[in-house]
Image (spheres, rainbow, N blue to C red):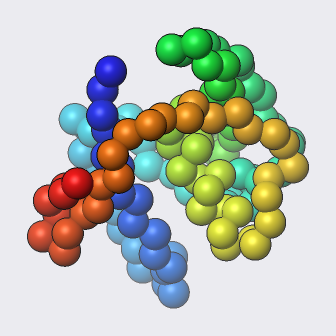
Amino acid sequence: MHLLVVVPIVGILSDIEGFKPVLNIDEVDDIFDVPLEMFVKDENRRSEERERMGQVFTIQYFDYEKENRKYVIWGLTARILIHAASIVYQRPPDFVERRLQFNLPKYSISSSGSATS
């Protein structure tokens, strides 16, 4: 089993036109924006049931098209965005999620970025 710690950073851009991200092709294929509300709606969404360690869980896929390009946002990225959208819009998603339940030690991230148990 892989233990993966992901710390999403969420911000608000007051001037989206002035924001000029730089693409790192070693990390991602493209940079694009999507409406956050998309991740609590049941539109443009599909899912797949999987089993791991005897537990059934759902992988969410969101299909998005912008400027004649098609994108699929899925897996951990989709899960993080569903959670963020649920917090921002103060409501659960319009669909049911089945997530894996882990009995792992609790970790916290210090201000220096190191993980502690």
Residue for point 75% across, 72% down: 90
**Nearer to us in this view, 47 or 68:** 47
Q: Residue 78's image quarter?
A: top right
* Position in image of residue 76 (x %, y %): 50, 38
Residue for point 35% across, 52% down: 106
Residue for point 79% across, 58% down: 92
Residue for point 57% across, 31% down: 100
Tell me if 92 is positioned left or right of 5 in this view.
Answer: right
In this rendering, the count of numbered labels is 0
Q: Is residue 40 visible?
A: yes
**Nearer to us in this view, 84 or 100:** 100
* Position in image of residue 43 (x %, y %): 86, 42
Compared with 16, 109 (above or below) is above
Q: Residue 73's image quarter?
A: top right
**Nearer to us in this view, 21 or 57:** 57
Tell me if 67 is positioned left or right of 17 in this view.
Answer: right
Q: Is residue 70 visible?
A: no
* Position in image of residue 46 (x %, y %): 77, 28
Viewport quadrant of the N terminus: top left
* Position in image of residue 24 (x %, y %): 24, 45
Q: Residue 20's image quarter?
A: bottom left
Tell me if 113 is positioned left or right of 74 in this view.
Answer: left
Viewport quadrant of the C terminus: bottom left
Q: Looking at this rendering, what residue extends furthest in the bottom direction?
A: 14
